[in-house]
Image: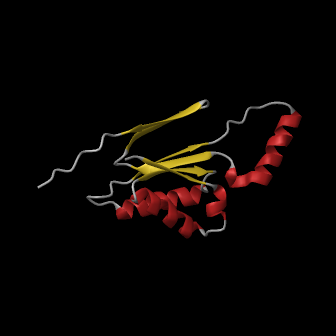
Amino acid sequence: MLTLQFVPYEEIEGLTSNERIKKLLGMVKDERIVVLEGRLRKEEEAELIRKTMEEINDRFKGIELSVVYPERRKGTLGRMLKNNITDMLLGQRQGLTVLGPASLIKEIKKDPDKIQLFTQERKKKRKR
């Protein structure tokens, strides 16, 4: 069974970077595809990838990660001011982060209008 878990930004907002990474990595290791409201800081993404690499083994093959961020179009002075105010108020809440186990996710494609997540077929375990 494929499990998607939505994580609102408020759930990780008060956590330290290490706590955020541990929480998200734990969900992925439980074979869930996580849809996080917002995004991690660049340093947190790098640390998540580093910790993932340390934990790769026969059972855990790693993660797939993609961040969808609202596209900024150049426009009027009013639009630029609005975008700057939005960034100040929302900060890391803007965007969407999708991550999951590499054993389940084949590929994540994104474009301005949609995100596509392709999963791999699970191999059935043989009964002995």
> How many numbered badges does the structure rendering display?
0
Q: Using residue 106 as the reference point, say whether residue 117 is left or right of it.
A: right
Q: How is the image coloured?
A: secondary structure
Quarter that holds the C terminus? bottom left
User: Residue 91 at x, y = what percent?
Assistant: 72, 53
User: Residue 117 at x, y = what percent?
Assistant: 46, 38
Kindly identify the residue that appears in the image at 51 percent across and 57 percent down: 46
Kindly identify the residue that appears in the image at 57 percent across and 32 percent down: 114
Residue sitting nearer the eye, 67 or 24: 24
Residue sitting nearer the eye, 1 or 90: 1
Say if 120 sits above or below 57 in the image.
above
Residue sitting nearer the eye, 30 or 115: 30
Kindly identify the residue that appears in the image at 61 percent across and 70 percent down: 16
Kindly identify the residue that appears in the image at 23 percent across and 46 percent down: 124
Q: Using residue 30 as the reference point, say whether residue 8 is left or right of it.
A: right
Furthest residue in direction left, as rendered: 128
User: Residue 12 at x, y = what percent?
Assistant: 61, 62
User: Residue 95 at x, y = what percent?
Assistant: 64, 45
Residue sitting nearer the eye, 55 or 77: 55
Q: Using residue 58 as the reference point, say whether residue 22 is left or right of it.
A: right
